[in-house]
Structure formats: C-alpha cells, structure tokens
C-alpha cells in the first residue's frame, strides 16, 4: 500500500537558518504530493503541492520538488522565521483506489528560536 | 476561498452520550469529504470517506455503527460518535475535496478540527 515517511522531530533551528525536512514515499501509481502545516491549536493548512514528477511546489518561501527517481518530496526553506514554528506533514493522494484520501506522514515538529 | 468549517470546535461529554460534529464547505461544493482522527503528537488517520448521497466508506478497524457519517448535501457532512467512551477522546478533523476547475481541483481543504473529550 501507500506510505509516507518523514524525518523525526523535533527540529530546532535558529532564526534565518536553512530548513530541510525529508519526506519519502511509496505508492502504487502516480500520486500527487503535498505538504501541510499545522500551527498550534489550529487545523491543517495546505502549504504546497506537486502533481507530477519534476514539479516544484512553492509557497511562503517554502519549496519542494517531486523527485520520482528517489521517491522524495523534501521540504526546504532558505531562512526560517519564528512564525514558521509548527508541525509539518508530508502527504500523498490515494490514486490507487480513486478515493483521493490522503496518506500522511507522522509529522515533523519545527521549533524556530529567535 | 476554499474554507471548511467544523462545529463544534470543542466538546466535552459524559460517557454513553452521543456527539454530532458538523463539517461544512463554505464556498465550494464537495461531493467527497473525509474524516480523520488525530491522536496527540501523532499523524492523521483516515476514518472514512463520505460521499454525497451514498453510504460512507470506512477504513479497516473503524466501527461504522459507532461512527455514523451522513453526507446529506454537497456542503455538509456530519460525524456522530454514538455511545461515546473515554477512549473516543481525540481530535477529529474533516476535509473536503474541491471538485471544481482550476488550481483547487483535487485539493483537499481541512477544517480546524473538533476536540472531543469524553469523561
């Protein structure tokens, strides 16, 4: 079946540091890939997505490239801010059954210190 | 655009009672909605897929008689936790799939979640 593996957190960085959160996946077909962010006490928000190989999703300074050859979708940001502190979830769409449900990774908590 | 609301945001109930959680897509039509459950510091686990006008599809291990799902319209799905017990305490999150055209196609939008505490 489909699965998503994320690096374990928490990840603690100083403000303006470079961020990478690794994400790899297994899927039977050609999934769409997503990064969602969950701020404290809030629901999930779509951060960015990519629907096919070599696509790059970007938003708010975050980027991730759909790498089919390495089955990866790593999240990067060049300079993090305190306001980026949140839990980040990598996910893929379940294209195999056609139900479009999302399979989530375990989440990575990011803590940015001033 | 693409806002999903949930009501209530928090609910505390006694063991044995039933609780209904509403999920609404406010500015788009959602033929498919999903219900997830999130335990503290863990990821979201899909409970069921809710299709407008038809029965929900439950994931393995989810009791359909305990977690009743109704998708009565293109903008509303409800989850009823029947005869709730303390082990049902969790964060329940719905999402709605925007079936419309454009950048929103095939993207899921999440509600803010409902925290259920069963005493």
Image (cartoon, coloured by chain):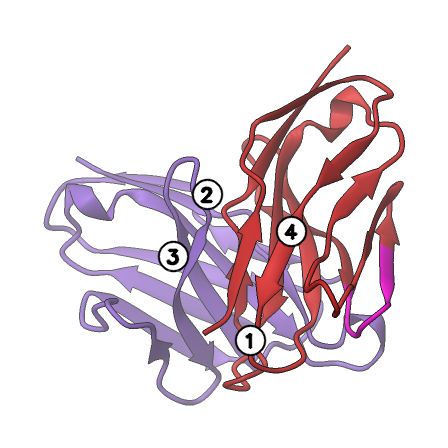
Chain colours: A red, B purple
State whether discs 3 and 4 lie on one chain: no
Q: Circle 2 marks a residue in which chain?
A: B
Residue that extends furthest to the top in the rendered view of this protein: A114
Structural crowding at the residue carrying mark 1, measured as other residues with C-alpha within 10 Å and reported as few (<14), some (14–19) or many (≥20)? many
**Most foreground residue, B3 or A88:** A88
Q: Which residue is mark 1?
A: A94
Structural crowding at the residue carrying mark 2, measured as other residues with C-alpha within 10 Å and reported as few (<14), some (14–19) or many (≥20)? some
Establish if B101 lies above or below B112: below
**Residue B5 location, x and y as percent?**
57, 55
**Most foreground residue, B39 or B78:** B39
**Residue A69 location, x and y as percent?**
75, 68
Q: Are marks 2 and 3 in contact (CB under 8 Å)?
A: no
Which element is circle 4 on?
Answer: strand
Residue that extends furthest to the bottom in the rendered view of this protein: B54
Residue that extends furthest to the left in the rendered view of this protein: B16
Image disc number at residue B9: 2
Q: Which residue is mark 4?
A: A23
Which element is circle 3 on?
Answer: strand
**Most foreground residue, A94 or B54:** A94
| Mark 1 → mark 3, Cα distance in angstroms | 25 Å
**Most foreground residue, B96 or A89:** A89
Boundaries of the magenta span: A50-57
């Amino acid at each position: 079946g489909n699965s998503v593996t994320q690096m374990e957190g928490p990840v603690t960085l100083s403000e303006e540091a470079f961020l990478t959160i690794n994400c790899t996946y297994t899927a039977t077909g050609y999934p769409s890939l997503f990064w969602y962010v969950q701020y404290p006490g809030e629901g999930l928000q779509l951060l960015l997505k990519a629907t096919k190989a070599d696509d790059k999703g970007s938003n708010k300074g975050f980027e991730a490239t759909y790498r089919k050859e390495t089955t990866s979708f790593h999240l990067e940001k060049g300079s993090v801010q305190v306001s980026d502190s949140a839990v980040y979830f990598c996910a893929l769409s379940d294209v195999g059954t056609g139900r479009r449900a999302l399979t989530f990774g375990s989440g990575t908590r990011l803590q940015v210190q001033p | 655009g693409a806002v999903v609301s949930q009501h209530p945001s928090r609910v505390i109930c006694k063991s044995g009672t039933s609780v209904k959680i509403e999920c609404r897509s406010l500015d788009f039509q959602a033929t498919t909605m999903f219900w997830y459950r999130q335990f503290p510091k863990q990821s979201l686990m899909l409970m069921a897929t809710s299709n407008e006008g038809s029965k929900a599809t439950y994931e393995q291990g989810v009791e359909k008689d305990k977690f009743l799902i109704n998708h009565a319209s293109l903008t509303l799905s409800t989850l009823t936790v029947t005869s709730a017990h303390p082990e049902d305490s969790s964060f329940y999150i719905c999402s709605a799939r925007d079936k419309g055209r454009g950048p929103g196609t095939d993207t899921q939008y999440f509600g803010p979640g409902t925290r259920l505490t069963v005493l």
